[in-house]
Amino acid sequence: MSAAPQVLTIPALEAEPGLVHGFSTISLGTMGLTQAPDPEAVLASRRHFARALEIDAESLTVAGAVHGSHVARIDEHHDVVRGVDALVTDQRRVALFATYADCYPIVLWDAEHRCVALAHAGWRGTVARVGPAALKALRSEYGSSPARIKAGIGPGICGRCYEVGEEVASQFDAQFVRKGEGDRFVLDLAAANRAQLEAEGVGEVHVLGLCTKETDYLPSHRRNPDGTRFAAIVAIR
Ligand SMILES: [Zn+2]
């Protein structure tokens, strides 16, 4: 058996010379502080992840993530920006960071204006349109044209595994929802986020297509709700 990778990337974004991005796996340990019995170990894991991407760990700026669609522009390092699910920057001295366990990381990269966004999209954030909100921030703050933006959707729970009730399913277009067991439904969040970005004119949307619930080296809240999180880092090289 081969060892699990430490960091995953989206090949089409990996090929972008100005962009650094990656998603950690459990090989690097949990990245979530909220339920962590040993916060120091989590901070060490975050530093290890940063080093793996050749990023200065001191530059990590964490999105507090509250399942909404507020966006913060980051011009200098902050430890945590509370109450936002997306960060944007055009500064090399900060690296955008957020944690996940089934929710989707969304990366937006504008090579023309050299600016990036990182968003956190669960079902609530998707209904709140956090992806288009991050895109709008790149337009208003840095003058990005959606057609020139390359988007990446990282690991998350897939459209076969993400069981939801009618109260959640009814908030999504029928094309993203299928009938599940009994009165349950299954929801394709990656497809819903891709469609939102494409409808806003984003030139390229690349979906990694790796399911957290089905991949044993990625943490999944649905498979094991113990607070374990993976993380995304996005920065400008
Ligand atoms: Zn799945």
Image: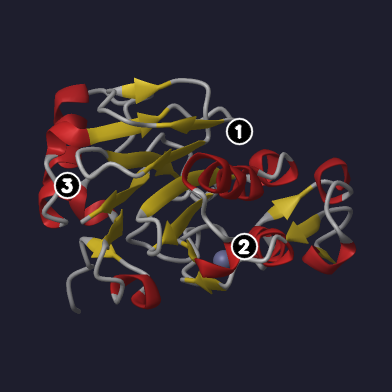
Task: Say whether residue 143 is left or right of residue 68.
Answer: left
Please name the residue shown 81% across and 46% down the image: 165
Give the answer, above or below, for where 212 lies relative to 206.
above
Q: CA distance from mark 3 to mark 1?
A: 24 Å
State which image quarter holds ligand 1.
Answer: bottom right
The residue identified by callout 3 is 50
Residue 229 point in image, percent of width and height = 37, 42
- Kind of residue at disc 2: Ala
Q: Earlier in the sequence, mark 3 or mark 1?
A: 3
Q: CA distance from mark 2 to mark 1?
A: 16 Å
The residue identified by callout 1 is 67
- Kind of residue at disc 3: Ala
Task: Say whether residue 200 is left or right of residue 237.
Answer: right
The residue identified by callout 2 is 190
Dot 1 falls on a residue whose secondary structure is loop
**Is residue 129 visible in this depiction of the protein?**
yes
Question: What colour scheme was applied to this rendering of the protein?
Answer: secondary structure
Dot 3 falls on a residue whose secondary structure is helix
Task: Say whether residue 197 is left or right of residue 164.
Answer: left
Give the answer, above or below, for where 36 lies relative to 212.
above
